[in-house]
Amino acid sequence: MTSAEQRYEAELKQSDIDHHTPTAGAMTGHIIANLLIHSLKISQAKLFAKGVAALFLEGYGDQWVVHEQQVFKELNTLLVSNGESIPTTIDQFKEFTMLEESGADKYQPGNEQLFNLIKDFDTQTLFITKAIALAQKEDWQPLAVKLSGLLAWINAQIAIAQHFLGHDLREGLYNEEDDDF
């Protein structure tokens, strides 16, 4: 019988292989980490944003957090139910997230804090579209469907928030010509 430490080491080794392949499960691990970090960033922005962005976050922030936490739980369950690894330690969440954090963000003007949350939503879409393509390639339809729903929801949130800020839909967001993904 193998020890818990040996099993965890084997999981980490397989996770490293999956992330370099990549697989739908590995890409979804990034999505899970991004959801957790983003929900924390939304909660903090609600505490510190000032001006009209504070009013916007008062109306939408809790809905965003609840939705992201629900999808976080559903994706974790789906992956574990299919024998996939998920991030389980703070170190793994920090390693897998692609969202940027700074303690100084709370001092930015409210509209900048909100726009940073929009850019985080946009960053998440890069991983989600890649994971959908991988899930379809791997014939993992339940994952593709769940991620497609998340993508549609995030795109709607980007549109609402960009409109609120007076931005065009893609203003200031990732552009394929930037090619930094």
Image (spheres, helix red, strand yellow):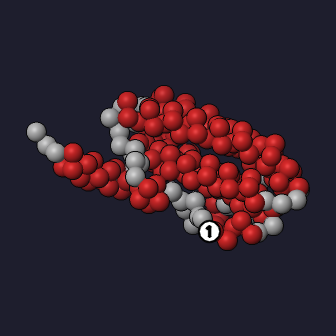
Side of 20 relative to 102 (left or right): left
Does residue 99 lie above or below 62 as drawn?
below
Q: What is the quadrant of the N terminus in the image?
A: top left
Does residue 16 lie above or below 66 as drawn?
below
Query: Nearest the camera: 7 or 143?
Result: 7
Image position, residue 104 (x, y; %): 67, 71
Q: Which residue is drawn at the image coordinates 45% and 47% (left, top)? A: 29
What element does badge 1 sit on?
loop
Query: Nearest the camera: 122 or 39?
Result: 39
Image position, residue 169 (x, y; %): 80, 52
Q: How crowded is the residue under tag 1: few (<14 C-alpha within 10 Å), some, or many (20+)?
A: few
Q: Quadrant of residue 120?
A: bottom right
Q: Which residue is drawn at the image coordinates 62% and 33% (left, top)? A: 149
Query: Nearest the camera: 176 or 107?
Result: 107
Residue at the limit of the structure toward the front, as seen here: 47
Q: Which residue is drawn at the image coordinates 65% and 65% (left, top)? A: 177
In this orientation, does residue 128 appear? yes
How many numbered marks does the figure carry? Answer: 1
Q: Which residue is drawn at the image coordinates 76% and 69% (left, top)? A: 108
Side of 130 relative to 169 (left or right): left
Task: Give the amino acid at mark 1.
Answer: Ser
Q: What is the quadrant of the C terminus in the image?
A: bottom right
Image position, residue 118 (x, y; %): 72, 54
Residue at the limit of the structure toward the left, as seen here: 1
Side of 46 relative to 34 (left or right): right
**In this figure, which residue is indicated by the disc labeled 1?**
102
Image position, residue 21 (x, y; %): 35, 52
Does residue 15 lie above or below 73 as drawn?
below
In this orientation, does residue 179 appear? no
